Amino acid sequence: MLNSKTFSYVLKIFSFLPKSRRKEFFALIPVALISGVSDIFVLTIVSRLFNFLSGQPRDSVPYLSNLFDFEPKYKILILISIFIIASWFSSFIKLYVRAKQLKLKATIWRDLSELALKNLLSQQYEFFIENKNTDLSASILVSINRVAENIVLPILKTVSGMFLIILISTTILVIAKLSALLLICGLLLGFLLISLSIIPYIRFATKKRLEVELASNNIINESLNSIIDIKLTNSESFFSKQFKNIGKNAIPAIWKGETLPEIPRALIEPFGITLIFIIGIFPSLFSSDITEIAKVIPFLATIAAACLKLTPPLQDTFKGYNAIRGGLPDLEVTLNLIKNNNQKNILKRDSFLDKFLYPKKTIKLNNISYSYPNSNTNAINNLSLKINVGSRIAFVGGTGSGKTTTANLLLQLLSPTKGNLLLDDLPLKQKHVKQWQMNCAYVQQSFYLPSSSILENIAFAKDKEQINIEDVWKAIDSARLKELVENLPEGLNTNIGDSGIKLSGGQRQRLAIARAFYRKSRLLILDEATSSLDNKTESEIMNSIDLISNNCTLVVIAHRLSTVINSDEIYEFEKGKIINFGNFEQLCKVSESFQDLNFLENKILNG
Ligand SMILES: Nc1ncnc2c1ncn2[C@@H]1O[C@H](COP(=O)(O)OP(=O)(O)OP(=O)(O)O)[C@@H](O)[C@H]1O
Ligand SMILES: [Mg+2]
């Protein structure tokens, strides 16, 4: 049983937790022991009390017999008082144990979620191309929560419960010997059989439930993100129906998954009572002397009290056992989320400044090929290009020709399948990628803006006290946003809504550009970053790049020729290759498609 997949996963997950958690875990044991001892104490008193009341000889309690040599009246009073105090103590200590367990569960849940997010963010960019963001967020929120609830908590309960079970069982054994042994073995066997038979169903239910949760989360996200299309195509009911159908499948998985572990729990009481009477009363029923039954009353009372004490930890243990074994799918998801930690790839923030890595002369892509994960064809094919540091470069070419992919390769967000990035003719090593990326700013073709203030959007991922307001205003001015921000009621602190929904397309683009400007990076890549701007604003921004760029290398990806006209070098892309390059005039001479474009644009511009 301990070799099973489930337990090896549990052990692995626990090995990822901080050391202090292990200490807290082991600290539960002495408290559980005290709780067990207090229970034994209560039981012994019960046994004593009933023996005394029924006038039976007191041989059944070996330890407390001679402690009280008082008058019977006082003896009863003392016994009852001790019983009351011990019961109170026993309940309080149990409450304390439960509080400790719940605290540890909550801490571990947080530990696992933090680990998962840290691990997720440290994955290579390609990982996010392959996985859906909504699935990842749902896994962190749902699976880890369930691992905490259905696996961590039951384990904590079981560990504490084990001590109670062992201590109470030993006491019963001492008091009732063979009958108790039969009782305990009967109970354990009964439970084991029930548990083993329901585990496959629980596991199936958990898996189904996981699928349904992911699918539901997907539909909610997709429908919210496509709200405009939903409105225009009047397809609200389509999504509602999809959601409803998934919900239908979910119900059996949910109720079965929750009811099945309850079965052993619900059966333990009648099962225990039946066993007690079979073992305790049956033998005396066959006896000729009816007073034999009276003799077993103290014994039955003690066993019944012991069973009452034994029931909760047994229930916890068996329910926990079933939940743990059934929770394998959740465990798998959680383990995947927290393992493979790529933490090495993240630089400590303080060490950033002295770790910049930037070439003095050239940035080159040397014979690079790249194919996206799960794709058979190369998006980039044996491509080489050279960028002089401080120059202005443009990528042009038809849609799907590989411009964005090449930008991602320059930024090392994607690692080439063949070839490498050369900085001053030296290949960039994997361990230096972070230092290289620290120099780069990238305004993406389609980007997301956090739903926060303009200030937080420009000074991205910086604490308020680290933000240099003067630089923020400079960036705003250069991105031609000053007038807008000054006229906003809350100025820099104005919230821009979900992904900047409160801004126009051009304002969003300028905000993204301002963020890139604020970073004062040395390689700035603008991927269609000015496509939503009118010609005048665009040329103003391009001019301000000249003004603020101090030795800044600029790569502009654009379809509009006016954007690239002033570039030192223009690379023309087609099907993942560079087919022509040179400055604007040179390209106009050699590239037919460029001539066509130039002609077309001139025609449009000049009527
Ligand atoms: N995540 C992806 N998975 C698989 N293939 C991709 C992925 N992203 C892009 N591609 C493919 O790679 C090729 C180059 O795409 P890329 O985005 O670099 O083109 P582009 O030149 O930037 O086009 P556009 O001007 O439309 O932005 C395309 O054929 C595209 O289908
Ligand atoms: Mg593109």
Image (tube, grey):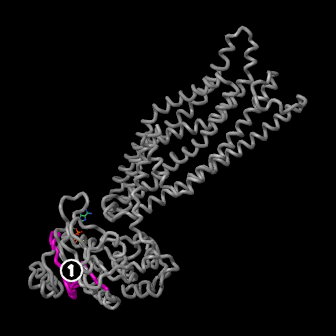
Residue at the limit of the structure toward the top, as seen here: 288
Q: Is residue 163 left or right of residue 234?
A: right
Percent coordinates x, y for residue 467 in the rendering = 48, 81
Percent coordinates x, y for residue 277 in the rendering = 65, 21
**68 or 134, which lies in front?**
68
Residue, x 19% and y 58% (percent of image)?
376
Percent coordinates x, y for residue 287 in the rendering = 70, 10
**Location of residue 370 (image quadrant):** bottom left
Residue, x 64% and y 34% (percent of image)?
310
Residue, x 74% and y 32% (percent of image)?
44
Residue at the limit of the structure toward the right, as seen here: 71
**Location of residue 67 (image quadrant):** top right
For label 1, the crowd category at 10 Å Cα-Cα, with few meaning under 14, some 14 to 19 and many 20 or more, is some
Q: In this view, does 19 lie above or below 559?
A: above
Residue, x 67% and y 18% (percent of image)?
281
Residue type beneath disc 1: Lys
Q: Is residue 484 magenta?
A: no
Q: Which element is circle 1 on?
A: strand
Q: Is residue 565 magenta?
A: yes
Quarter occupied by the C terminus: bottom left
Residue labelled with disc 1: 386
Q: Is residue 562 above or below residue 215?
A: below
Percent coordinates x, y for residue 122 in the rendering = 39, 64
Q: In this view, does 249 lie above or below 453?
A: above
Q: In this view, does 291 lie above or below 103?
A: above
Residues shaded magenta: 552-577
Q: Quadrant of ligand 1?
A: bottom left
Q: Does the residue labelled 1 lie within 8 Å of ligand 1?
A: no
**Location of residue 550 (image quadrant):** bottom left
**259 or 122, which lies in front?**
122
Q: Is residue 355 left or right of residue 295?
A: left
